[in-house]
Image: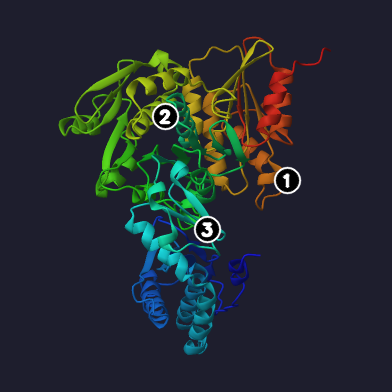
């Protein structure tokens, strides 16, 4: 067992408890994140009836005292107040992050003692315990290598087991317990590869897949991560949600990789931070209501600040690709130093005209043509009808994804001709873009399968399907248990814009997250009935696959079906490929 794993339970630090104060688990920050670009540790504290400014003042005093006692004078104390709580953080040396977790707990022990008027433990004894853990954890050889990599201007990736320098074809990986001396490293063989970070509330998976497809067609071996896979070239390294730093490291350490397109989710940013500090381009597709309330993210402004953490991996010469049609993104962009490449559905967008005036790159839709404009005001373009995922512009969300991919791939150094070829050949089918507006024909009916799970993404899908002809309309939807009753009501109300004749509310037993079986389908049914649908129009199903099969048994030629599939996707695909049994 890695000796670092033993350090997780090295100390058992307690603090005064109260019903009106709740502490989430302390998290190690292994890379740049929402608060700053440093490594360290962070905790979210939820409270009622406490002055937030007073709590923050206590935190600053006690955390600073702990850092100084550890001889970490160069490290910083951070905080962020949010509605009903505060995020409290310290920075720490990269080889001392388990110690940093205990340091946060120690500082909070002192804060809680002050808040609740109880006597703290002996400070010196607590610091001695911290120093003992730090002595076991510290790795001077690792820090020497980190300093050398920085001096050579090459990225370095670290986890509990391995350290690597460089990316892809220019990377080398060692065991964390067998770190070479800087003079033993063949630095001339090491380098970074062009890297794209792609984030946003919706559209990031499609944009990542599209960028990767374009880069492959341009002749590159692509490292790709998403909520589905880690992939290098045509090889699937692993399946699962790899939109965090672990997936990024896996892809970037593969020696075949020449370009990397990495999906970056909110959760990974907030739990651990970014895996790399060296992106060539970062994309923020949009900001919408999803996962609010987790990790102290309670507003869209908070969420935008989280997503914009990808900009911490950019230097002044790198490119941040932003959606000019999203007011939350426009507001959050005001303090960005990197070059911004705006994209918009509208050529007259203020951000587009401003970019043109300053000779900055941008992309936009102009009367059915997607146009990319370089920083020298040269342009190349492709007709919307030649970009399959846009449905000739009817799919506005995928038109924006295509524009974002144009900008990102241009920033990666891919030629306009190669980008246009990639855009014209990428189709949103189960092979290229599973779960994202996949279209099937079943028993003469038109069936759309989509992962849309929040109001913003569902509205986009419904808008795309608005003009599709239909004799009857069928809808299946579900929701995870950690969505509030209000969110489930809003999502259901949005999905009902599809104007279904029949609704199936599917249970996701793996995503109950504290709910009772049947609770979520009942909430969906209640919302539908409140919106004017009858009980006889709303059915429940034990799973998305069961719900899909029920719908497929009902449909007839010229019907239109929307299956919002958050789980059981492969089983749903299989059902759509199999003909109905003859009666």
Q: Left or right: where does residue 147 sit relative to residue 315?
A: right
Q: Which of pointers 3 and 2 lies earlier in the amino acid sequence?
A: 3
Whether residue 94 is visible, yes or no, is no
Q: How crowded is mark 2: few (under 14 residues within 10 Å), some or many (20 or more)?
A: many
Give the number of the mark in front: 3 or 1: 3
Q: Which of pointers 3 and 1 lies earlier in the amino acid sequence?
A: 3
Figure quadrant of the C terminus: top right
Separation (CA) of disc 3 from disc 1? 38 Å
Question: Circle 2 sits on which residue?
Answer: 401
Separation (CA) of disc 3 from disc 2? 32 Å
Residue at 29% of width from left, 41% of height from top?
330
Give the number of the mark in front: 3 or 2: 3
Q: How crowded is mark 1: few (under 14 residues within 10 Å), some or many (20 or more)?
A: some
Q: Is mark 1 on a helix, strand or loop?
A: loop
Residue 90 at what x, y percent from top left? 41, 69
Residue 9 at what x, y percent from top left? 62, 72
Q: Is mark 2 on a helix, strand or loop?
A: helix
Question: Circle 1 sits on which residue?
Answer: 517
Whether residue 198 is visible, yes or no, is yes
Residue at 50% of width from left, 90% of height from top?
122
Q: Which of pointers 1 and 2 lies earlier in the amino acid sequence?
A: 2
Q: How crowded is mark 3: few (under 14 residues within 10 Å), some or many (20 or more)?
A: some
Separation (CA) of disc 1 from disc 2? 36 Å
Which dot marks residue 159?
A: 3
Establish if 354 lies above or below 472: below
Judged from this view, the residue extending furthest toward the left is: 357
Figure quadrant of the N terminus: bottom right
Establish if 58 lies above or below 290: below
Dividing the picture into quadrants, the one containing residue 2 is bottom right
Residue 255 at what x, y percent from top left? 50, 42
């Amino acid at each position: 067992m890695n000796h670092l794993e033993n350090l997780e339970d090295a100390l058992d630090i307690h603090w005064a408890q109260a019903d009106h104060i709740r502490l989430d688990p302390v998290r190690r920050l292994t890379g740049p994140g929402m608060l700053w670009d440093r490594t360290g540790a962070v905790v979210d504290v939820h409270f009622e009836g406490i002055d937030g400014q007073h709590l923050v003042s206590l935190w600053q005093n006690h955390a600073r005292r702990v850092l100084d006692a550890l001889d970490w004078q160069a490290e910083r104390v951070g905080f962020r107040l949010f509605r009903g709580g505060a995020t409290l953080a310290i920075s720490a040396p990269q080889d001392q992050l388990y110690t940093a977790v205990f340091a946060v707990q120690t500082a909070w022990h002192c804060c809680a003692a002050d808040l609740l008027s109880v006597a703290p433990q002996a400070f010196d004894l607590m610091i001695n315990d911290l120093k003992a853990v730090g002595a076991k954890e510290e790795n001077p050889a690792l820090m020497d290598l980190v300093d050398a990599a920085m001096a050579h201007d090459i990225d370095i990736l670290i986890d509990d087991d391995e350290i690597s320098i460089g990316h892809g074809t220019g990377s080398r990986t060692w065991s964390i317990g067998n770190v070479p001396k800087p003079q033993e490293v063949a630095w001339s063989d090491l380098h970074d590869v062009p890297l794209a970070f792609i984030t946003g509330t919706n559209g990031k998976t499609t944009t990542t897949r599209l960028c990767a497809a374009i880069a492959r067609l341009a002749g590159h071996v692509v490292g790709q991560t998403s909520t589905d896979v880690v992939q290098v070239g045509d090889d699937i390294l692993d399946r699962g949600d790899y939109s965090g730093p672990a997936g990024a490291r896996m892809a970037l350490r593969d020696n075949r990789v020449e370009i990397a397109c990495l999906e970056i989710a909110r959760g990974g940013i907030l739990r651990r931070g970014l895996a790399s500090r060296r992106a060539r381009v970062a994309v923020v597709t949009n900001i919408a209501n999803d996962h609010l309330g987790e990790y102290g993210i309670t507003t869209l402004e908070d969420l935008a600040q989280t997503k914009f953490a990808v900009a911490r991996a950019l230097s002044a010469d790198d490119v941040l690709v932003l959606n000019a049609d999203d007011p939350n993104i426009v507001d959050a962009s005001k303090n960005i130093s990197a070059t911004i490449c705006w994209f918009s559905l509208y050529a007259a967008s203020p951000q587009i005209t401003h970019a043109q005036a300053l000779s900055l790159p941008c992309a936009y839709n102009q009367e059915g043509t997607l146009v990319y404009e370089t920083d020298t005001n040269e342009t190349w373009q492709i007709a919307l009808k030649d970009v399959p995922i846009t449905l000739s512009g009817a799919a506005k969300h995928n038109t924006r994804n295509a524009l974002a991919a144009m900008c990102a791939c241009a920033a990666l150094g891919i030629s306009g001709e190669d980008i246009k070829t990639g855009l014209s050949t990428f189709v949103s089918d189960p092979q290229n873009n599973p779960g994202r507006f996949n279209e099937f024909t079943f028993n003469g009916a038109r069936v759309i399968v989509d992962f849309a799970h929040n109001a913003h993404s569902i509205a986009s899908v419904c808008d795309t399907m608005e003009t599709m002809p239909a004799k009857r309309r069928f809808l299946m939807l579900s929701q995870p248990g950690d969505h509030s009753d209000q969110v489930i009501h809003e999502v259901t109300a949005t999905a009902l814009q599809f104007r279904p004749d029949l609704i199936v509310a599917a249970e996701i037993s793996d995503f109950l997250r504290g709910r009772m079986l049947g609770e979520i389908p009942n909430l969906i049914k209640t919302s539908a009935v409140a919106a004017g649908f009858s009980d006889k129009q709303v059915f429940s199903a034990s799973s998305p696959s069961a719900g899909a099969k029920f719908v497929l048994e009902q449909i007839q030629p010229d019907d239109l079906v929307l299956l919002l599939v958050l789980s059981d996707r492969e089983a749903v695909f299989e059902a759509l490929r199999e003909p109905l049994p003859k009666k």
